[in-house]
Image: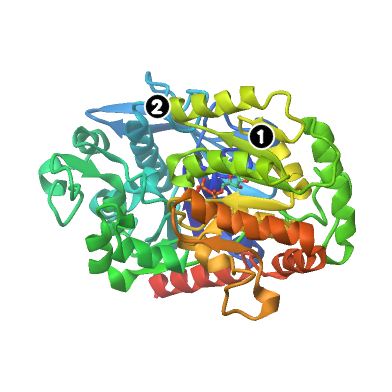
Amino acid sequence: MYIAMVSAECAPIAKAGGLGDFVQGLARELSIRGNQVEIFLPKYDSLRFDRIWGLTKVYEGLWVPYYDQWVHCDVEYGEVDGLKCYFIDEHARENFFRRGKIYGEPDDANRFAFYCRAVLEFMLKSGRHPDVIHCNDWQTGLIPVLLYEIYQGLGMKHTRVCYTLHNMGHQGVTGDSILRQVGLKPERMMVMERMLDPVNHRAVNLMKGGIVFSNFVTTVSPRYAWEIQHTDQGMGLQGLLQYYDRKFGGVLNGIDYSVWNPELDPHLPQPYGPDTLPQKAASKKALRQRLGLADVFKPIITVVSRLDRQKGVDLIRRAIYFSLESGCQFVLLGSAPEPAVNERFWGIKREMDSNPDCHLELTYDEELSHLIYGGSDMILIPSVYEPCGLTQMIAMKYGVVPIVRRVGGLADTVFDANYSDRPFEERNGYLFDELTESALEAAMGRAIGLWFRFPEYFRQLRVNGMRADNSWNRPGQSYLDIYHHLRN
Ligand SMILES: Nc1ncnc2c1ncn2[C@@H]1O[C@H](COP(=O)(O)OP(=O)(O)O[C@H]2O[C@H](CO)[C@@H](O)[C@H](O)[C@H]2O)[C@@H](O)[C@H]1O
């Protein structure tokens, strides 16, 4: 099967969060199974060019419609760890992809709308007819709309679209002039059955367009699929998702064990696995050295996260103090898109400056994240909502015990050490329900108590997590089943 993955991110060259891991992991799994997979990305100036092999121009003079003009683009091709990637290189006056970052610009909606039109224009002009285009999140919500409204009429008749929702918190709600930008008619699209936002009746909703016009819609865990159809986690689109129930389902993400595996990880001083767990101590030591933490008999509790409100930033802050009060060390790796949140964490960082048990690294650092997973004992994920969550799965592979809130994919992957109905060998962490400090502290207290008092039992929890299969094997098959269903 011929699959085109269209996304704003792909690890390791353009990653802001979990979407990047998803595209990389699923594309690799589909390739291994013998499918032809092509990944499409904007040619951001912030790409990790050192990780792209053989970047060359393969299409010159792609003219992409933009309002009533045309914008000149080229398309470049390169390989990333064996995956085939095409990059849309635009020469617009607006410099859509030369902003030093992936997101966070005032014209993000226009930038990604342009990208969608450019991808389809390239597919048409270069004679590509994928069996399935797999799109992701609001940035590529216009792909199925444009395919149906424009490109099918130009000959792309048999291509089907699978659309994956990674985060209902960002839907691409914007003014309707974006429709004219990409060549759609506002009077046709700004109706409830198409792209009109259900809350703001003057705005267009790009994610809604993606849901309406795709042949199949998925989200990244079964529990989140239920939450966004039946609770306000749908953020206004729950009715729509119920209406399209027959083409909607949750597929739990996997993680790429060729990237996230302590037995192979080049960023760790010494490899380890479930049968060589004592060797994890070398990573803990190296982490402490790297961050200037004391080498003492204490567990390291970590948070690796975008410091977005979704991630429970208030509870993360409380957890820092609670960890220190409970005789633990604390390491945070996070970057905050919101200036107010960023400022608050910088305040804590300054306060902890000379504390040998605490380190906050307020940046994005892929390499350091590997050493943190390697060196930590527990990871905290107190999310307000969490579509899937990859950090608990990565952490478990590294023998780190997760303490998480019972929402979305966290509830589908973490099973409580004390209160689960699962058999003991499947229990791998700690859960709490309420979004409160006391609920957080109770769960953390149970985990920390076990580490100090019953190390053998704590070791067993680590091993259970390491032995769980969160690979792309099962989800890869689920997506192939969906693609085959669409093609037939
Ligand atoms: N400061 C930092 N430095 C280095 N690495 C960092 C980092 N902050 C985060 N990361 C890394 O980014 C990834 C984040 O994964 P999450 O599951 O938390 O995704 P996110 O919320 O971004 O994405 C959304 O999409 C994914 C994929 O579908 C869903 O799992 C998730 O629930 C949904 O919110 C992990 O690989 C983590 O190690």
Q: Is residue 296 above or below residue 128?
A: above
The residue lying toward the viewer, choosing from 153 and 29, is 29
Q: Is residue 111 above or below residue 436?
A: above
Image position, residue 40 (x, y; %): 50, 45
In this rendering, position of residue 38 left or right of residue 375? left
Pointer 1: what residue? Answer: 365
Packing grade of label 1 (10 A; few <14, some 14-19, many >=20) is few
Q: In the structure shown, which secondary structural element does the residue marked by tag 2 occupy?
A: loop
Q: In the structure shown, which secondary structural element does the residue marked by tag 1 occupy?
A: loop
The residue lying toward the viewer, choosing from 266 and 110, is 266
Q: Is residue 125 above or below residue 412?
A: above
Residue 259 visible to the viewer: no
- How far apart are labels 1 and 2 at the CA level? 21 Å
- Residue at 39 percent of width and 76 percent of height: 488
Residue 365 visible to the viewer: yes
Q: Nearer the viewer, mark 1 or mark 2?
A: 1
The residue lying toward the viewer, choosing from 196 and 71, is 196
Q: Is mark 1 within 8 Å of ligand 1?
A: yes
User: Which amino acid type is shown beneath numbered disc 2?
Assistant: Glu
In this rendering, position of residue 352 left or right of residue 116? right
The residue lying toward the viewer, choosing from 15 and 121, is 15
| Mark positioned earlier in the residue sequence (1 or 2) | 2
Pointer 2: what residue? Answer: 105
